[in-house]
């Protein structure tokens, strides 16, 4: 009976509770950042009521990532995922050649390697398509930063 209960609780915890906790932590962090910014703005208004609030908010708010930075993060994720897929496939081939694993587990290694490799290739395609589509926007951002 206890073994069946564990088989039910573990997937529910990983599939439901863990994502909810992650989302709540993200929301809480965002609320804390917003509250800190509000406190800073209120303190600045108390000290100097004639201050330009919009300029102050721009200065204290976190800077948005440029399109180029976002694309480079996609490229990094693609490279890591592709490398992990190739490494897992190489490990599976090596273990298969040496004959040191059960066939079912070996199939899982192959499947995991192929999935990671496919996801990495998909990320690389996404990066290349995004780079081609956003060339003009990236140039406009660079010009805007220079001015």
Image (tube, grey):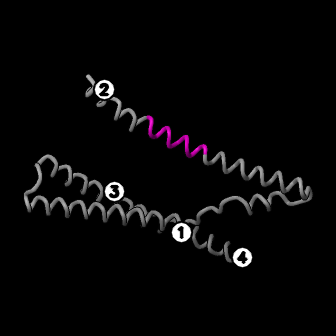
Residue 10 point in image, percent of width and height: 34, 34
Spatial CA distance of label 4 from label 3 is 39 Å
Instruction: Name which of mark 3 and mark 1 comes first in the sequence.
Output: 1
Is 24 a magenta residue?
yes
Spatial CA distance of label 2 from label 3 is 34 Å
Q: Which of marks 4 and 3 is in front?
A: 3
Spatial CA distance of label 1 from label 2 is 49 Å
Instruction: Name which of mark 1 and mark 2 comes first in the sequence.
Output: 2
Spatial CA distance of label 3 from label 1 is 21 Å
Q: Nearer the viewer, mark 1 or mark 2?
A: 2
Query: Is 130 situated left or right of 137 in this image?
Result: left
Q: How many labels does the image show?
A: 4
Instruction: Name which of mark 4 and mark 3 comes first in the sequence.
Output: 3
Image quadrant in which you'd find residue 6: top left
Label placed on residue 147: 4
Q: Mark 3 points at which residue?
A: 119
Label placed on residue 68: 1
Segment colored magenta: 17-28
Q: Residues within 10 Å of mark 2 (few under 14, many from 20)?
A: few
Q: Is mark 3 in CB contact (under 8 Å) with mark 1?
A: no
Query: Is 75 situated left or right of 37 in this image?
Result: left
Spatial CA distance of label 2 from label 4 is 63 Å
Q: Name the element at disc 1.
A: helix
The answer to whether residue 77 is above or below residue 112 is below
- Image point (45%, 35%), residue name: 17
- Report the predominant secondary structure element of the magenta stretch: helix
Instruction: Name which of mark 2 and mark 4 comes first in the sequence.
Output: 2
Q: Name the element at disc 3.
A: helix
Q: Mark 2 points at which residue?
A: 5
């Amino acid at each position: 009976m206890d073994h069946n209960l564990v088989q039910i609780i573990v997937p529910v915890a990983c599939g439901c509770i863990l994502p909810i906790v992650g989302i709540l932590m993200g929301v809480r962090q965002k609320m804390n950042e917003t509250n800190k910014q509000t406190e800073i703005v209120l303190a600045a208004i108390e000290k100097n009521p004639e201050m330009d609030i919009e300029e102050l908010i721009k200065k204290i708010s976190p800077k948005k990532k440029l399109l180029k930075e976002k694309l480079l993060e996609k490229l990094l994720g693609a490279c890591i995922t592709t490398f992990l897929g190739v490494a897992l496939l190489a490990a599976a081939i090596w273990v298969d050649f040496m004959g040191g694993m059960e066939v079912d587990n070996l199939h899982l290694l192959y499947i995991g390697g192929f999935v990671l490799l496919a996801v990495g290739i998909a990320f690389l395609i996404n990066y290349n398509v995004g780079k081609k589509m956003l060339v003009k926007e990236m140039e406009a951002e660079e010009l805007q930063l220079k001015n």
